[in-house]
Image (cartoon, helix red, strand yellow):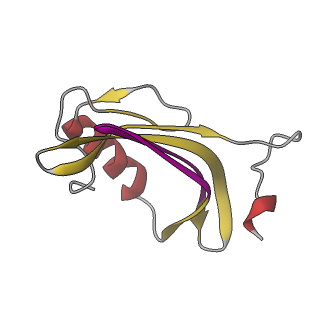
Amino acid sequence: MGKIWADREYAGCILPGQELVSGWKEIRESFSSLFGGTGKIRFRLGDLHVVQKGDLAWVSVVENVHHGDDVLIAVQATNLFERGKDGWRMILHHASPISDDAGEPDTNFMQ
């Protein structure tokens, strides 16, 4: 993840159910905590949209997070990238859960 994220104080990350974490060091610790006690986690991506304007680009995507064969959560994520001397680096990740009417993750689009 260090190759993707910008090492900037203004970089930010909002994971589902959590508050904003700022700065690469804190973001790395947040993801380490999230994935640290977990075995195999897979992401299946869908509904991808990419827009670039100058030195900024954003990607919106549906992330289906799997643990084994089970879907843990489906989230709508937006990732903001900034182009600098080291190329494109992420400066913001914001993910929010997607639910159907029953409050369960909506995974119908995965077929």
User: How far from the left and from the top, in percent, is residue 52?
Assistant: 41, 43
Q: Is residue 74 left or right of residue 56?
A: right
In the rendered view, would you say 41 is above or below 73? below
4 or 103, which lies in front?
4
Say whether residue 54 is magenta.
yes
In the rendered view, would you say 21 is above or below 78? above
Quadrant in the rendering for residue 71: bottom right
User: On the rendered image, what quadrant is the N terminus found in?
Assistant: bottom left
Instruction: Give the residues drawn in magenta, as a range.
Output: 47-64
In the rendered view, would you say 85 is above or below 23? below
Quadrant in the rendering for residue 90: top left
As drawn, which residue projects farthest toward the left? 85
User: On the rendered image, what quadrant is the C terminus found in?
Assistant: bottom right
Q: Look at 54% across and 43% down and name the residue there.
A: 77
Q: Look at 40% across and 56% down and name the residue there.
A: 35
Q: Look at 55% across and 32% down and name the residue there.
A: 17
Q: Look at 76% across and 58% down and name the residue there.
A: 107
